[in-house]
Image (spheres, rainbow, N blue to C red):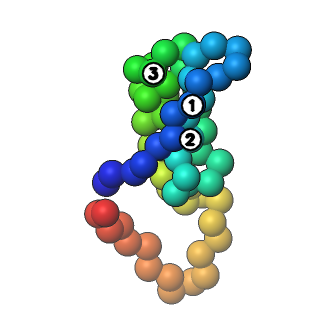
Amino acid sequence: MKLKVVLEPSEEGGYTVFVPGLPGCISEGDNKEEALRNIMEAIELYLEPVEDDIPYPPGTELMEVAV
């Protein structure tokens, strides 16, 4: 899966990076490389399912799909 990220210099130094396609998915780093590593981790966590938080009605089938 490929996602576009926006990398912008931060006023305090370093970089802020966010993913327009994933609202609220944002990170930062002291340099571009660190910011990109951090946003990749943030994306993985953002997309990680939180199955325990979702109540499923009886008879519901949970499946996985690859994107």
Specify the label residue 18 is tagged with. 2
Say what amino acid the circle numbered 2 marks. Answer: Phe
Which quadrant is home to the C terminus?
A: bottom left
- The residue to which callout 1 is attached is 8
Question: Which one is in front, 48 or 63?
Answer: 48
Q: Amino acid at mark 1?
A: Glu
Residue 63 drawn at (x, y percent): 38, 72
Instruction: Calculate the distance from the C-alpha at mark 2 to the C-alpha at mark 3.
Output: 12 Å
Amino acid type shown at disc 3: Lys
Q: Is residue 42 left or right of residue 12?
A: left
User: Of label 2 and label 3, which has the lower sequence position?
Assistant: 2
Query: Is residue 42 visible to the viewer in this orientation of the structure?
Result: no
Residue 10 drawn at (x, y percent)? 65, 22
Quadrant in the picture for the N terminus: bottom left
Circles 2, 1 touching at the beta carbon (< 8 Å): no
Where disc 3 sits, the SS reads: helix
Secondary structure state at the residue bearing disc 1? strand
Residue depicted at x 61% and y 81%: 57
Q: Position of residue 49 (x, y in %)?
A: 50, 55
Outermost residue toward the bottom in this view: 59
Residue 14: quadrant of the picture:
top right
Give coordinates of residue 12: x percent, y percent. Answer: 70, 14
Q: Residue at x 57, y 83 (%)?
A: 58
Between the residue at mark 1 and the residue at mark 3, the CA separation in whole angstroms equals 9 Å
Q: Dot 1: within a 10 Å radius of its alpha carbon, few (fewer than 14), some, or many (20 or more) residues?
A: some
Left or right? Give the position of 66 relative to 18.
Answer: left
Instruction: Judge by depth and name the residue closer to the eye, 33 or 45.
Output: 33
Report whether residue 25 is seen: yes
- On screen, 12 above or below 17? above
61 or 42: nearer the eye?
42
